[in-house]
Image (tube, rainbow, N blue to C red):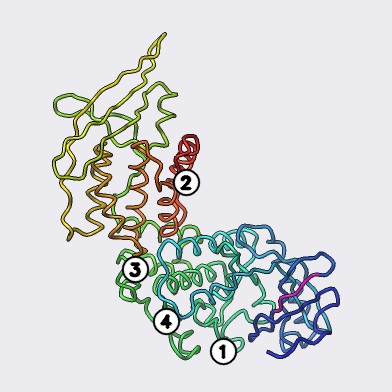
Amino acid sequence: MPAVPRTLLPSRYGDVRPIARGGMGEIYRATDLELGREVAVKLLAERYSADTDSRGRFRREALAAARLSGAPNVVTVFDVGEHNGRPLIVMEYFPGGSLEERIAGRPPCPTGQALEWVEETARALDAAHAAGIVHRDVKPANLLLDDSGHVHVADFGIASAAGLASFTATGTILGTAAYLSPEQARGERATAASDRYALAAVAWRLLTGRRPFESSSPTEEAAAHAAAPVPSVHAANPELPQSLDRVFERSLAKDPRARYSTAAELVGELRRALDDEAGETWAKPQPAVPARSAQGHARRRAVPVVLLGALAAAGIGAAVLTAALAVGGGTRQVQTVVRTVTQPGETVRRTTTVQVSTPPAAPPSTSGAALNNAGYAQLQAGNYAGALPLLQQAVRQLSGTGSTDEAYAEYNLAYATLALGQCTSVLDLLDRSQAVQGHRPEIDRLRHDARRRCDRSHGRS
């Protein structure tokens, strides 16, 4: 890229270096000499600012987008103006580059990472739509990554400001046709539903490694968005569950009225489809009510560790479990259960010793998913010691697969480990689980309890 002329940007910006050049203009990294901070400066191409009306429209749209600064996952706009007759935007600089740069030429993202990026984008879009602002050009190149890998959406309203509200307005928009809604491809006005369509197309790209209507011709690709049936995401990536097809059939519907009503709803349906495929095979919160067996004996169900202290404080009872671990099939183990029961006028500590049989060690050919299912069943029965070796084997087999089974197995192993009074690798397991499946409140609660207990005992490793 040629050297940057000294007069290209206002004098307050120094150390100017080019970042990218595209159809809409150029982007430069610079230092704001007055405020002493790095910024990104987008300078719109001369052909989009050739007349006064265009420059006025750009300024109005850019100022409206600047109102979103400070909203979740939205790029902060510091200044809007023009220099030497060319409109410019000064905005937050993100060292992680764009999502397009991160994923270009790479295989599908792990589902958890894809969901996290889509959820962050959805949060920004819903905030914009609530303020009456439509992006019109949602695509990976406009999703910028901070140094922690979180997405921030850039360029709200800029496509409209530059006269690019629809595909037919300019004939060809390279890099945009891949995510263009059918109504935009037909030359109709873009709406919030158009942004949600584009977000679904981005989600497709992240989950499959390709665009839903991928073509070497932008014109053909835009036409496919307008007329071609929605292809199966499962067929594009057989590792994904077929239940995702119905989510994309709705989110990529030709009729805007048939799509999800918010971006958050789209993300929720994506997450539910993935969870349904994995089944009820991870330790989720359950009621702290003992189930009665046919003999009338109370059998303790798997109650999340994070709830134990609260149950004791409520006078219901709390259990601290210890076990002598053995992996061999049929080995008898001892669990000591200490319950604190609050009765009128007194507090009684009762100690009960119970015998638990460890399930036989699974044969080497057993799949990681099956091992996780078996371990989960033991957790449900309250047999944490029996669940532990099964879940350890499951995590070893599933490690690095990036599947929801891996995420659930890591969560379940962390759950069982902490329930047995140990801290080893609990927080690391939870971090790995979240990296695959994204943010979940269950993970946050278990992590909070683990930090509280393990920091107190200095047991984290």
Q: Which residue is mark 3?
A: 245
Judge whether 19 appears above or below 413 on screen.
below
| Secondary structure type for disc 1 | loop
Q: Quadrant of residue 204?
A: bottom left
Which class describes the residues within 10 Å of circle 4: few (<14), some (14-19), or many (20+)?
some
Q: Which residue is mark 2?
A: 444
Q: Residue at x 36, y 40 (%)?
A: 285
Percent of width and height locating residue 111? 40, 64
Which class describes the residues within 10 Å of circle 2: few (<14), some (14-19), or many (20+)?
some
Judge whether 208 appears above or below 218 on screen.
above
Q: Are marks 1 and 3 in contact (CB under 8 Å)?
A: no
| 2 or 3: tag closer to the N-terminus | 3
Q: Quadrant of residue 378?
A: top left
Disc 4/disc 2 C-alpha distance (Å): 37 Å
| 4 or 2: tag closer to the N-terminus | 4
Q: Which segment did they paint magenta?
A: 28-32
| 3 or 4: tag closer to the N-terminus | 4
Q: Can you tell which mark lies on residue 449?
A: none
Q: Which residue is mark 1?
A: 172
Q: Are marks 4 and 2 in contact (CB under 8 Å)?
A: no
| 4 or 1: tag closer to the N-terminus | 1
Question: Which amino acid, by three-letter code, is at mark 1?
Answer: Thr
Disc 3/disc 4 C-alpha distance (Å): 15 Å
Disc 2/disc 3 C-alpha distance (Å): 30 Å
| 1 or 2: tag closer to the N-terminus | 1
The label nearer to you, 1 versus 2, is: 2
Q: Which residue is mark 4?
A: 213
The label nearer to you, 4 versus 2, is: 2
The quarter of the rendered structure image containing the N terminus is bottom right
Judge whether residue 258 is colored magenta. Answer: no
